[in-house]
Image (tube, rainbow, N blue to C red):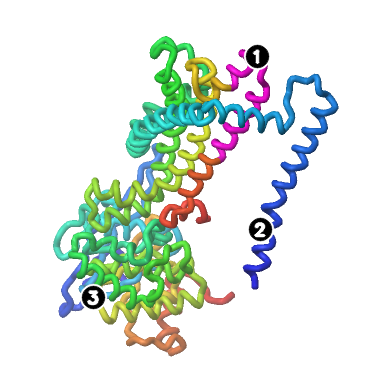
Amino acid sequence: MSLTQPVSVPAAVTTKLSVEHVSMVFERDGKSTHVLNDISLDVGDGEFVCLLGPSGCGKTTLLNAMAGFLSPTSGEIKVSGEVVRKPDPRRIFVFQERGVFPWLTVEGNIGFGLSKLPRLEREKRVAYYVKMVGLEGFEKTYPQELSGGMKQRLEVARALAVNPDMLLLDEPFGALDSITRLIMRGELLRIWEAERKTIVFVTHDIDEAVQLADRVVVMSARPATIQQIVNIDITHPRDISSPRYLELRDGIFQQIGLAHKV
Amino acid sequence: MQDESAARTTVRVRLRPIAFIAALLVLWSIGIRREPSHLLPGPWGVVGGIADLVRHGLLLKYVVASLFRVTWGFVLAVVLAIPLGLAVGWYRRAEMALNPILQILRPISPLAWIPIAILWFGVGDLAAIFLIFVGCFFPLMLTAINAVQSIPAVYVNAGRNFGLSSAALVYRVLYPAVVPNLIVGLRITLGIAWLVVVAAEMIAVSSGLGFLIIDARNAGNRYDLVLAGMLIIGVIGLLLDMGMRSLEKVKSFRWGYSED
């Protein structure tokens, strides 16, 4: 597999997001850290892509650049042909740490991005997404009284409520216990299948990537380059003990250079 | 089930300080009775002192005078220090420029400003209010600076992500994010204001609880009134603190205190 050449999506799908030769260098205390090295990647409309790599490899940095929180040192990121220069409600970032606002109730959080809508419309939308993420009965509850999984669902609901084209998720389930994490993956896939947003999902968990994504982008350690892009050609719902699943997963394990024996 | 035993525990916990205070009062009475020549009054003497103050209409008058000065000094400090502190905290360069001078002014006791207060404002309410203002301004400003700087970046980023304008970012994200820290600062500072007013009234004015204490001593060693004044100061200070504490219980503020 080539390392830097952009991998194009099938012709039938329009490109939603394109990362073109993006490099990122941070200057701090006179030292410069090379975080991303000439990354090129196309993501199709409605596609679910996982960025997979070791901790600290720069995948979150890349996601931040896609969101417009950071600008690349060189290269460009385009969404629907427009160069990304600042954050935009059409692509919502779901944070690794709890990003819900603790001073707002569940309703207040989901309605946060809807302040421009007339009240009735806003209430309808809030109610719809409360239901979608299964938080009925908790509308007036503050985040501190919710469990970790509920908070994460709340954040996803807040993101979906503004009807973005794209969701950028940064290890959103990393802090959850393994059972909740499995449930949340199922929920996310259900929502994705219903709404068909373009999703870029950062994770360091190989199983998570293979369970969720259409394509898994395997990144190297810093400075990050794209090592390989793996097509996950299994239909949902995926049987995680099927030979094909295991084959793909083991392939990635090997690619990263891990023997999967404990 | 759990409520019941919890309630019983609460009652016991509440009774404990009352029992302790009662024991101290008894010890106090015994001590005074064994040494009657002493200028200090016993508990009943203090009660008598308070009754005296009420009879002369001084209690309410002095309490109101002290609270009036505290309110003005404190409110002025809040109105100026908090917006200024929030702005300074947000702009790192402003903070770097101002920080050294703040660090020098902050440890100066407000009482050290007394001569300057009298020089500028003469003897009267304004001098006392100025002293309270000075005592509150620096801690409040530092609280506001720290509150802004400790806002987690995710909240600001999330706000920007949802397309908020700068003004909306300030009142929908920055303001709610700093409120819990500010409330803590306000509570501490109101305590300072209440400390400073007593000292200021001993020197700069002829009314209020601080004046009561110094006047009672100077005009005939009325230590029953001195202790009555101290007791009233303590009780009002406690009430002020309880008032501020009740703000901490507001649900949309409370997250800041309970979260890891």
What's under tag 1, amino acid-wise? Gly
What's under tag 2, amino acid-wise? Thr
Whether labels 1 and 3 belong to a single chain: the reply is no
Question: Which label is found at residue B10?
Answer: 2
Relative to B34, residue B151 above or below:
below
Crowding around mark 2 (Cα neighbors within 10 Å: few <14, some 14 to 19, many 20+) is few
Chain for mark 3? Answer: A
Query: Disc 3 on helix, strand or loop?
Result: loop
Which residue is depicted at the point 24% across and 46% down? B167
Chain for mark 2? Answer: B
What's under tag 3, amino acid-wise? Gly
Q: Which residues are magenta?
A: B213-238
Indicate which label's residue lies in the foreground, 1 or 3.
1
User: Quick check: A16 left or right of B19?
Assistant: left
Residue A64: image quadrant is bottom left
Residue that badge 1 annotates: B220
Residue B86: image quadrant is top left
Indicate which label's residue lies in the foreground, 2 or 1.
1
Question: Which label is found at residue A46?
Answer: 3
Front-lying residue, B236 or A233: B236
Q: Position of residue B118 (x, y in %)?
A: 44, 12
Question: Which label is found at residue A194?
Answer: none
